[in-house]
Image (cartoon, grey):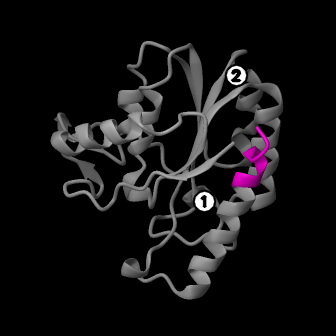
Amino acid sequence: MLRINADFSCLEGTNCFCAPESAERIRRNVAELPLHAFHDIGTGDYHYVSLFWLERIREPFSLVLFDHHPDDQPGAFGDGLLSCGGWVALARRLPLLRSDVWVRDAADFPALQRLPEGPVYLSIDLDVLSPDYARTDWDQGAMRLGELLSALRAIAAAHPVLGVDLCGGLTPEKGASPADEALNARTGEAVWQVFADL
């Protein structure tokens, strides 16, 4: 599986909330990139970019979300403005989405065994991990990296993987130290390696 940079944070009107005109620009860009890939989408402020990948899927599928936050909150400004905290609620309206599973910690892993047969799309926010394994600017969970990798391997062994995206992590603009960036890079590499040969 190819690893590609799908970070659109350079566009105006995209930080945490995505203005409609920016959303259309991102959709056009996403349309030119492979769906079956490992997409690096930037910090958690841009997790809503996952929705644009899901919109491209043309067969029934399940979404597996590894995230410390549910990302299915009602929009603060109604449905007109896509946000990093509400994109899952919109994804649930996609006609081909059969099921979605939110994994916040290891206690949620049994739900993965109840996924329907068929393909999955995986969306991973580094904030699901303990600060020992990733540094983000959001409240973080307590999952260990080994737990996450084991869960991802089990999913990939049981289901065709349509695509994967990864977000989270501090940027220098938000106070990331070189050590923070190095830790996040190592963790991102470890996650990608699960899918590198798919």
Residue type (three-letter) at the residue carrying disc 2: Leu
Q: Secondary structure at mark 2?
A: loop
Rendered position, 195 above or below 146: above
Rendered position, 128 above or below 57: below
Residue type (three-letter) at the residue carrying disc 1: Gly
Q: Secondary structure at mark 1?
A: loop
**2 and 1 marks in contact (CB < 8 Å):** no
Rendered position, 110 above or below 189: above
The numbered disc on residue 191 is: none
Residue 107 or residue 3, whichever sits in front? 3
Q: Per the image, is 115 magenta? A: no
Q: Which residues are magenta?
A: 192-198
Q: Which residue is mark 1?
A: 141
Camera sees residue 102: no
Camera sees residue 182: yes
> Residue 74, how many percent across, how many down?
29, 36
Residue at x 44%, y 61% (from the top left corner): 43
Residue at x 63%, y 70% (from the top left corner): 185
> Residue 30, how many percent across, how many down?
40, 39
> Residue 17, how many percent across, how many down?
25, 50
In the rendered image, the quadrant that contains the C terminus is top right
Q: Quadrant of residue 28?
A: top left
Left or right side of 32 for 12: left
Left or right side of 18 for 43: right
Q: Quadrant of residue 108?
A: top right
Q: Which residue is mark 2?
A: 115
